[in-house]
């Protein structure tokens, strides 16, 4: 005989509440992780000259990930003209120049960090940040959007992908000058369903789970009622 006990009902109610909480957390987690950066996309277009054994790509939506796959040392230049050495990537590991203007500028992810007086003068101060693998990921201010407002050339009501700007990052692989070119795109413009579709799905999922729960409760109650013993008519006079 199937019985709907209080303990079983409580367990099913807790399971439903946990599912509801998980569904509600999905959009909030996505917003907390992506934020404004989720509305932008970094595209690497070209690496010159061709054949240099390095890999440059976008990482985590708003970072550049640079990997040296060769035997020569790769120097990533900072923001100062003439290639201020910012990062070295080579067989001995990954080193960051703590005496470069780029180092201080990149301490703040949403704007150029404050650069102290005298930074960038004198010899580089290399600090090893990784032995292996030979890659470095960082917020290059040329390759991601900074600030809470939209770029002036962007229409938030346009659902199409829109170019924000082009960017260039210079490097030096051994004795060879390297130029990485790319573009930053805005992908946050969307239709109503694009903006609020995840919330519609969340509410729909919650409603479906509640309906399933209520149907299950009614089914079990009906089964319990059907299995209950009946009293024959006239038995009370027996």
Image (cartoon, helix red, strand yellow):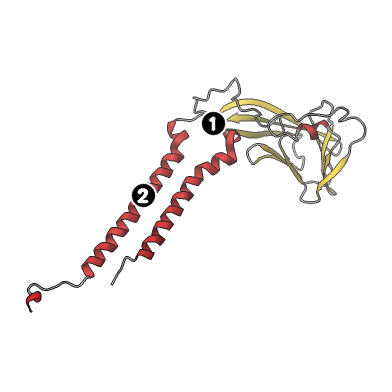
Q: Are marks 1 and 2 in contact (CB under 8 Å)?
A: no
Residue 68 to residue 152: above or below: below
- Locate residue 168, reporting x and y percent: 73, 29
Q: Residue furthest front?
A: 237
Residue 17 to residue 164: above or below: below
x 87%, y 41%: residue: 126
- Locate residue 231, reporting x and y percent: 14, 73
In the displayed structure, does residue 49 sit left or right of residue 152? right
Picture quadrant of residue 227: bottom left
- Locate residue 71, reporting x and y percent: 83, 47
x 55%, y 31%: residue: 187
Q: Which residue is mark 2?
A: 208
Question: What kind of element bears circle 1?
Answer: loop
Quadrant into which the N terminus falls: bottom left
- Report crowding for label 1: few under 14, some 14 to 19, many 20 or more residues within 10 A (C-alpha): many
In the displayed structure, does residue 198 sit left or right of residue 150? left
Residue 151 to residue 63: above or below: above
Report the front residue among 46 and 101. Answer: 101
């Amino acid at each position: 005989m199937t019985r709907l006990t209080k303990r079983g009902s409580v367990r099913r109610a807790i399971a439903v509440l946990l599912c509801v909480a998980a569904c509600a957390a999905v959009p909030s987690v996505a917003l907390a992780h992506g934020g404004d950066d989720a509305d932008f996309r970094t595209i690497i277009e070209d690496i010159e000259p061709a054949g240099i054994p390095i890999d440059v790509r976008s990482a985590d939506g708003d970072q550049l990930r640079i990997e040296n796959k060769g035997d020569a040392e790769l120097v990533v230049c900072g923001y100062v003209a003439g290639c201020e050495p910012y990062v070295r990537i080579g067989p001995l590991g990954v080193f960051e120049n703590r005496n470069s203007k780029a180092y201080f500028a990149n301490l703040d992810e949403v704007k150029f960090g404050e650069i102290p007086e005298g930074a960038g003068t004198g010899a580089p101060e290399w600090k090893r940040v990784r032995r292996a693998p030979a890659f470095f990921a960082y917020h290059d201010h040329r390759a991601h959007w900074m600030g809470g407002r939209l770029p002036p050339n962007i229409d938030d009501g346009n659902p199409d992908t829109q170019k924000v700007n082009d960017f260039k990052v210079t490097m030096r692989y051994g004795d060879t000058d390297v130029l990485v070119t790319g573009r930053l795109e805005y992908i946050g413009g969307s239709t109503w369903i694009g903006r609020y579709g995840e919330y519609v799905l969340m509410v729909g999922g919650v409603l479906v789970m509640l309906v399933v729960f209520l149907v299950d409760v009614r089914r079990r109650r009906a089964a319990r009622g059907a299995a209950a013993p009946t009293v024959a008519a006239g038995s009370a006079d027996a």
